[in-house]
């Protein structure tokens, strides 16, 4: 089933062929749900699926590769093939994807002299080692070997970043040397300067765009007078950033543009077909005009197959358009996924202050001045900087030079304020007694920049800490990656135990239950400050199914379900629920751990539908 090109289209095994594809990222979907999501996309009428390969999830430490479980990209590709789908693979090394650092491993930022995405020897050596590990797992799955992979990308939207033709040629030739015999292509924005920077002579050039299809296809023709017209990313919707509205695009309008593309004879890849979730700490960020915008946990993307597998109106509108151009879709529309019954979760079985757990969470190191996460071998999570301030000092201001991204400031355990990279001149006023005081800066990496010139985005503190104009020296630095939680020293309070029975008796959300939970928790006088909170939910005889966790009254933090990090929550929105897929739940007792960085709420809520917040149209001109 080899894919080749003609003067205006594709041949698949010598027969005219049009690619109708949908994007899905294996690393954003629980592996036990890969089949379900692929079957849903197949039922929409696509004949192909496309996935990025996220380098940083496979090589978190240099030279140590993981292709198992969630990272079994070959297994994902093979499964798509079993379902009769062709596969397009985009191995990067850079992928963007609103993913942490655009898929580039954080350890690259520790290499002396290394500069990203160019013909720089140290960087190229790291990329070559990555391809040496990855490609032998994919080449047996190439179409020429009887597998489903029909095409592979060379880098990703490189014209949005640079124009180093030698770098692109190195990647292209490296794919060929390692046995990649399928069709190769580049993908860049459908504007002249993007195409000029990202194209490789003799290699199929494709476009990424979401509107004005005739303009976009005309641009592709200017730079490639013959060959297939391909929209490699049809942005029929958009991603969400914390503090911004939930982006949506009306189904009928999205379907109209898809119809225009197919009517023009173009092949198309829907971005996204199924978006999935930025579980754990893996979300990326964007930086526009100096303003840093971290990506939300949900990557629902207003896709036709929603984050929890639900089929949106866009699914049915797209299926209708695809059938009109390719013939009847023979695969039936799957039923809606099952959901857990909604209820309030008020059985809090313990709390533990973060500062009481430090020795369990990370090893401290001594340094003269603050150093970023990468210098200490850390990729994501939190990092704590501690020093002793001399006194007496009255009414001084503390500033951080080179903060990435958000710091909570504590003096002798008392929180004084928060600093953020979007306010580089921000300061926290404080006073120091004659005996001195302990200063703690708890810094959260909110996601490395995934697009544009700022992807070398070091986290923690890259400069220094100043009191007025004086740098402070002599620091204890403690990385807190918080990927897997250890056994924490949870302690119950009277309010936890006294309210448990009342809460359990009214698990289902109704008016009586709400009142009982509130009454049971009314005496829970939680102290503010970073702390872990453990909740218990017993599903009884109810079989595990998908659910969505809401945290009303909570401020900002991370949630783990039975030890798995679901992702971040933040009261600024837009999203108000975290997706908790069925394979993470257990029959009977389940444990939910919440790390709240500020002030906790009194309970959690289990919902049967996502709440991604107030909506706003996707940005114009994308």
Image (tube, rainbow, N blue to C red):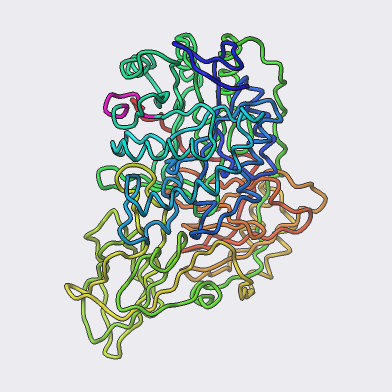
- Vertical order, 217 against 107 (above or below): above
Q: Residue at x 45, y 11 (%)?
A: 8
In depth, the one of 151 and 497 nearer the eye is 151
Q: What is the quadrant of residue 203 in the picture?
A: top left
Q: Which residue lies furthest to the left in this view?
A: 469
Q: Which residue lies furthest to the bottom in this view?
A: 435
- Vertical order, 80 against 65 (above or below): above
Q: Can residue 598 be seen in this view?
A: no
Q: Quadrant of the N terminus?
A: top right
Q: Position of residue 84 (x, y in %)?
A: 68, 25
In depth, the one of 36 and 555 nearer the eye is 36
Q: What is the quadrant of residue 400 in the picture?
A: bottom left
Q: Is residue 5 left or right of residue 523?
A: left
Residue 160 highlighted magenta (yes or no) = no
- Vertical order, 516 against 77 (above or below): below
Q: Position of residue 591 (x, y in %)?
A: 68, 60
Q: Which residue lies furthest to the front in this view?
A: 177
Q: Residue at x 67, y 30 (%)?
A: 81
Q: In this view, does 279 lie to the left or right of 97?
A: right
Q: Can residue 243 be seen in this view?
A: yes
Q: Position of residue 517 (x, y in %)?
A: 65, 58
Which portion, as a residue range, is magenta? 188-195
Q: Quadrant of the C terminus?
A: top left
Q: Where is residue 51 in the image (x, y as percent from the top left)?
A: 54, 35
- Vertical order, 480 against 118 (above or below): below
Q: What is the quadrant of residue 436 in the picture?
A: bottom left
Q: Is residue 442 left or right of residue 82?
A: left
* Badge count: 0
């Amino acid at each position: 089933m080899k894919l080749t090109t003609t003067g205006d289209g594709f041949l698949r095994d010598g027969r005219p062929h049009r690619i109708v594809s949908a994007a899905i990222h294996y690393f954003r979907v629980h592996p036990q749900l890969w089949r379900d999501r692929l079957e849903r996309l197949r039922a929409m009428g696509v004949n192909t699926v496309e996935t990025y390969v996220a380098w940083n999830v496979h090589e978190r430490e240099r030279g140590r590769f993981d292709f198992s479980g969630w990272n079994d990209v070959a297994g994902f590709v093979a499964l798509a093939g079993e379902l009769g789908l062709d596969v397009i693979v985009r191995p990067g090394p850079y992928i963007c994807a609103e993913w942490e650092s655009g898929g580039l491993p954080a350890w690259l930022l520790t290499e002396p002299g290394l500069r990203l995405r160019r013909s720089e020897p140290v960087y190229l050596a790291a990329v070559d080692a990555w391809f040496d590990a990855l490609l032998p797992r994919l080449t047996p799955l190439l179409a020429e070997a009887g597998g489903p992979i029909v095409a592979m990308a060379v880098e990703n939207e490189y014209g949005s970043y640079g124009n180093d033709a030698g770098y692109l040629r190195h990647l292209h030739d490296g794919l060929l040397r390692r046995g990649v015999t399928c069709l190769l292509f580049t993908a860049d924005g459908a504007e002249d300067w993007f195409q000029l920077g990202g194209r490789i002579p003799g290699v199929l050039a494709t476009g990424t765009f979401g509107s004005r299809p005739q303009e976009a296809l005309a641009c592709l023709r200017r730079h490639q007078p013959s060959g297939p017209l391909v929209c490699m990313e049809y942005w029929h919707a958009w991603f969400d950033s914390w503090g911004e509205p939930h982006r949506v695009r009306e189904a009928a309008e999205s379907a109209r543009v898809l119809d225009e593309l197919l009517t023009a004879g173009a092949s198309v890849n829907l971005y996204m077909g199924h978006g999935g979730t930025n579980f754990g700490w893996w979300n990326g960020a964007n930086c526009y005009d100096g303003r840093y915008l971290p990506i939300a946990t949900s990557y629902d993307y207003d896709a036709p197959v929603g984050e929890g597998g639900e089929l949106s109106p866009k699914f049915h509108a797209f299926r209708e358009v695809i059938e009109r151009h390719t013939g009847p879709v023979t695969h039936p529309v799957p039923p809606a996924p099952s959901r857990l019954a909604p209820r309030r979760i008020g059985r809090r079985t313990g709390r533990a202050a973060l500062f009481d757990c430090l020795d369990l969470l990370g090893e401290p190191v001594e340094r003269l001045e603050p150093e970023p996460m990468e210098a200490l071998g850390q990729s994501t999570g939190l990092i704590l900087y501690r020093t002793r301030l001399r006194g007496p000092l009255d009414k001084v201001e503390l500033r951080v030079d080179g903060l990435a991204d958000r710091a909570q400031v504590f003096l002798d355990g008392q929180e004084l304020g928060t600093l953020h990279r979007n306010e580089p001149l921000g300061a926290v006023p404080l006073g120091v007694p004659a005996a001195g005081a302990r200063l703690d800066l708890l810094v959260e990496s909110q996601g490395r920049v995934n697009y544009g010139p700022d992807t070398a985005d070091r986290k923690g503190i890259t400069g220094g800490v100043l009191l007025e104009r004086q740098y402070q020296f002599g620091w204890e630095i403690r990385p807190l990656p918080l990927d897997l939680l250890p056994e924490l020293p949870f302690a119950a309070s009277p309010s936890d135990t006294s309210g448990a029975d009342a809460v359990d008796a009214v698990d289902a959300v109704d008016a009586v239950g709400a009142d009982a939970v509130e009454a049971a928790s009314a005496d829970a006088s939680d102290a503010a400050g970073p702390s872990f909170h453990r909740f218990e939910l017993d599903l009884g005889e109810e079989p595990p199914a998908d659910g969505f966790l809401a945290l009303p009254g909570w401020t900002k933090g991370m949630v783990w379900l039975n030890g798995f990090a679901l992702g971040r929550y933040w009261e600024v929105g837009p999203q108000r629920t975290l997706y908790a897929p069925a394979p993470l739940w257990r029959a009977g007792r389940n444990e939910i751990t919440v790390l709240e960085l500020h002030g906790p709420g009194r309970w959690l809520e289990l919902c049967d539908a996502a709440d991604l917040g107030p909506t706003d149209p996707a940005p114009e001109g994308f």
